[in-house]
Amino acid sequence: MKAITPVIALVMLMLITVGMVGIAFVWFTGIFSSSTNKSVLIPPGGAYCDGGDITVRVLNEGSSVITGTDILVADVDGTSVLGTPFMGDMKNYFIGQWKMDETSGIVAMDTSGNGNDGTLKPSCPDCPQWVDAKYKKGLKFDGSNDYTDITNELSSGITDSMTLGGWVRPNAITNYGVMMRPVNGNFWLQWSSTSNYFYGAVFRSDGSDVRANFPAGVPALDKWTHISMSYEKGVLKIFANGVQVGSDSKPVMNVKTMFGSTRIGGGAGGGSGQLNGLIDEVRLYKRSTGDVNIQPGQSAVVINYPGTEGRHATRIGTSTNVAEASVTCA
Ligand SMILES: [Ca+2]
Ligand SMILES: [Ca+2]
C-alpha cells in the first residue's frame, strides 16, 4: 500500500486539475513501477517508465471499436510513436466470439458476425445447460457427454498467429477436459490426461507443437478464471487472469491447418475429453495479442516500441471513450 499511496494522491491531484481546466482527457506523468513485472495500469492518461521495451496498451470494453485516433499522444523520449510498428483492433481479427448469453435453445451464437454458431450436443435435455455465469449466462457441461459443436471451418482462418481465451469454472478435473479444441486437434486449451494440470498447445505445419502448462491449481475448482493463449512467430504464451504464467518457443512456423469441427466443453471425439464445469465468453482470434491479454469484452490498440538502454519517458493521451491505458516496460 505504501507504493500505491503516492499514485492515488497523484491521480486525485490530476482529477482536480482536470476538473479545473475541463479538458477532455486525463493527462498526467509520474513514475509507475511494479516489483514483479514493471507493469502499470493507469486510467486514460499517461505514464512514465524506465528501461527496456515499452508496450503501450489502450483497451476498451468492446462496445465501440478503438482506432488509432483514440490515442491522442504517445511519446517515447519525446518522439511520437503513434502507429509503430503495430496498431490494430483485435475485433478486426475475430474468428468467433461465443458469449453464451442465450437462456434457452440449442444454439450458442457466434456474436462476432462470422456465423460460427455452436450447437449443443447431445440432444436435450441431456445437453449442456444454460446457467448464470461470469457475464450473464454461460454453459454448464456435465463432464460426461456434453459439448458445443461448431461445424464451420475455424482452422482455415488461422495461419501464422492466433489467440484463444475464455472464462472457465471447473467443478472437477477431468481427463482431457476441453475448454476449446478442434476435433482434429491442431490447438487447444484443456486438462491433461492423467495429472492435475491445465495446458495450452498449438501444432505447427511440420507437426511439431509448442505447449505450456498452467501452474498447479490454475484454473481453480469452483472459481472463475480467465485463461488464454496466444501464438505468434513460434512463441506460445499462456495467461491466467491477464497475467502471463508460461510460454514455449520453437522456430517460426505457421499453425497447422486441420479441417473439421471445433468443440467447446468437449473433446476430440468419441466421447472423450468432456469438461466438468462452466464456460463463458470464449473468443478466438486469427492473430496474436502479443504481450496483451485481451479480456472478455475488450478490444485493444497496441503500440510496441523497442527500447534501448536507459530511461524512457512514455506519455499517452487518450480520448474519453477509452476504458484503460497502460504501459509495460520489459
Ligand atoms: Ca449430458
Ligand atoms: Ca455470457
Image (cartoon, grey):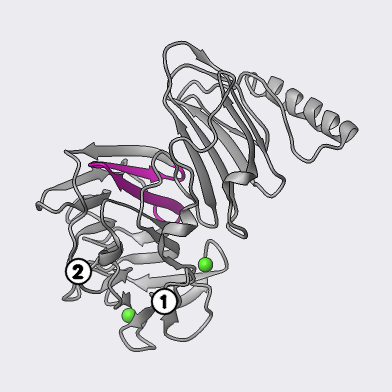
At 60% across and 38% down in the image, what residue appears?
325
x and y, in percent, of residue 215 in the image? 32, 40
In the foreground, 23 or 265 = 23
At 44% across and 41% down in the image, what residue appears?
86
- Give the residue pinned by disc 2: 268
Identify residue type, mark 2: Ala
x and y, in percent, of residue 229 in the image? 34, 49
Position of residue 31 in the picture relative to residue 265 (left or right): right
- Give the residue pinned by disc 1: 115
Circle 1: element type: loop
Is residue 219 among the parts visible in the rendering? no
At 44% across and 52% down in the image, what residue appears?
226
Choose top left, top right, bottom left or bottom right for residue 69. Answer: top right
Within 10 Å of the Cα at label 2, are there few (<14), some (14-19), or many (20+) other Cα atoms? many
At 60% across and 54% down in the image, what residue appears?
61
In the image, which residues are magenta?
A: 220-242
